[in-house]
Amino acid sequence: MYCIRCGLQLPDDAKSCSRCGTPVPGMAPPQSGLPWAILACVCCCPATGIVAIVYALKSAELFKQQKWEEARKAAAKSVRWSWISVHTAIVLTLAYMVYGVILLYRQLDQFDQLMK
Ligand SMILES: [Zn+2]
């Protein structure tokens, strides 16, 4: 067994490369972003959450095909899109709150004018 990054020969039971620290493929799948992707899709922003889910599924598929490096990249993209979903949701929520406050003030203004 050889390290995929630096090519160092590793013992068969090695979990990571002793020289460069690269995890040995096949021991653990890349950190799946799928739970986060689904959560992001349901709770935050469906449009960007879907992208995260697609990448998470693609990562699992690439991992099965033993394309470790591509699987890792797809997983990383999935996690990134999950974060984009969270940020989008936060921005939208804040925007709604600001909009709500503006509406409230307008209503109060009108109310004041009615009372005069
Ligand atoms: Zn290595």
Image (spheres, helix red, strand yellow):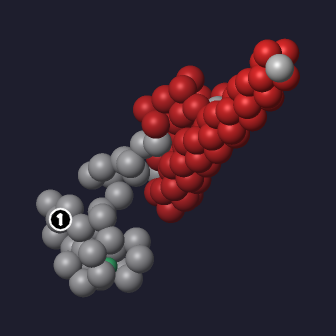
Q: Position of residue 57 (x, y in %)?
A: 56, 36
Residue 54 is at least partly visible in this image? no
**Residue on which disc 1 sits:** 14
Task: Residue at 68% x, 38% y: name it.
Answer: 98
The residue nearer to you, when weighing 72 against 12, is 72
Asked if 102 appears above or below 5 in the picture, the reply is above
Q: Position of residue 42 (x, y in %)?
A: 56, 23
- Quarter where residue 52 is shown: top right
Tell me the quadrant of the picture where the N terminus can be found. Answer: bottom left
The 10 Å Cα crowd at callout 1, few under 14, some 14 to 19, many 20 or more, is some
Task: Residue at 38% x, 48% y: name it.
Answer: 31
Relative placement, left or right, of 110 versus 21 is: right
Relative placement, left or right, of 65 versus 15 is: right
Q: Position of residue 93 (x, y in %)?
A: 62, 35
Tell me the quadrant of the picture where the C terminus can be found. Answer: top right
Relative placement, left or right, of 101 versus 71 is: right
The residue nearer to you, when weighing 105 against 71, is 105
Task: Residue at 27% x, 75% y: name it.
Answer: 21
Tag 1: amino acid: Ala
Asked if 21 appears above or below 87 in the picture, the reply is below
Label 1 SS: loop
Q: Quadrant of ligand 1?
A: bottom left
Residue 94 is at least partly visible in this image? yes
The residue nearer to you, when weighing 85 against 12, is 85
Asked if 105 appears above or below 13 in the picture, the reply is above
Asked if 25 appears above or below 58 in the picture, the reply is below
> In this figure, what is the number of numbered marks?
1
